Image (tube, grey):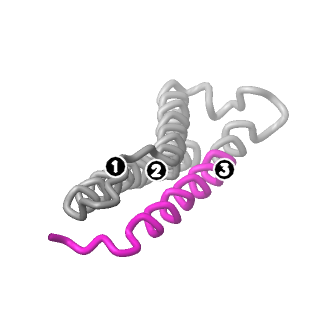
Amino acid sequence: MTCVKNQLTFLNKAGKRVIELSTGMLGILFAVVAFGKDFPPPYLKDSLAQTLAVLTLALFFLALLAGFMCVQPREYKDFPNNLKEMRKELAQHTQWKAFWFRTGSLLFGLGAFGLVCLVIRIIL
């Protein structure tokens, strides 16, 4: 059996970090998209840049949602006299949070890559 000591605390903190980073990157993306006096800016008239902007926005938003799923409290069954079932319930709870943290991290990474591609497309 794998040790899950402090895993829930770690996953809650990690999920909050995904939320913080995704929110920050969404701010950067909005700054890139809304830069200038005209909307949409001239560099977003290119269909590839528009596609990258929308895709990046979607990825960061989905990462944000995954982070929220990670930190949301979940109901669980209480087995005060059955240690085996308590461990099983804890493992399921930890797996749930780990899944959403990994999903959020992956989406955040893809969103960051999309933002880099967008900035490169704008510069070139």
Rendered position, 34 above or below 106: above
40 is within the stretch colored magenta = no
* Residue bearing mark 2: 70
Q: Is residue 114 something that shows in the picture?
A: no
**Residue depicted at 43% across the width and 62% down the height:** 11
**Residue depicted at 61% across the width and 57% down the height:** 20
Q: Dot 1, crowdedness within 10 Å: few (<14), some or many (≥20)?
A: some
Left or right placement of residue 2 versus residue 70 in this view: left
Element at label 3: helix
> Label 3 vs label 1: CA separation?
30 Å
**Tag 2: amino acid:** Cys
- Region of the chain picked out in magenta, as a range: 1-28
Q: Residue furthest front?
A: 81
19 is within the stretch colored magenta = yes
Judge by depth and name the residue closer to the eye, 83 or 116. Answer: 83
Number of the front mark, 3 or 2: 2
* Residue bearing mark 1: 96
Left or right placement of residue 88 versus residue 27 in this view: left
> Label 3 vs label 2: CA separation?
23 Å
* Residue bearing mark 3: 28
Left or right placement of residue 71 versus residue 94 in this view: right
- Residue 10 in the image, given as x and y percentages of width and height: 45, 69
Q: Dot 2, crowdedness within 10 Å: few (<14), some or many (≥20)?
A: many
Rendered position, 42 above or below 87: above
Element at label 2: helix
Q: First in sequence: mark 3 or mark 1? A: 3
**Residue depicted at 57% across the width and 51% down the height:** 22
Q: Quadrant of the N terminus?
A: bottom left
Judge by depth and name the residue closer to the eye, 109 or 13. Answer: 13
- Residue 9 in the image, given as x and y percentages of width and height: 47, 68
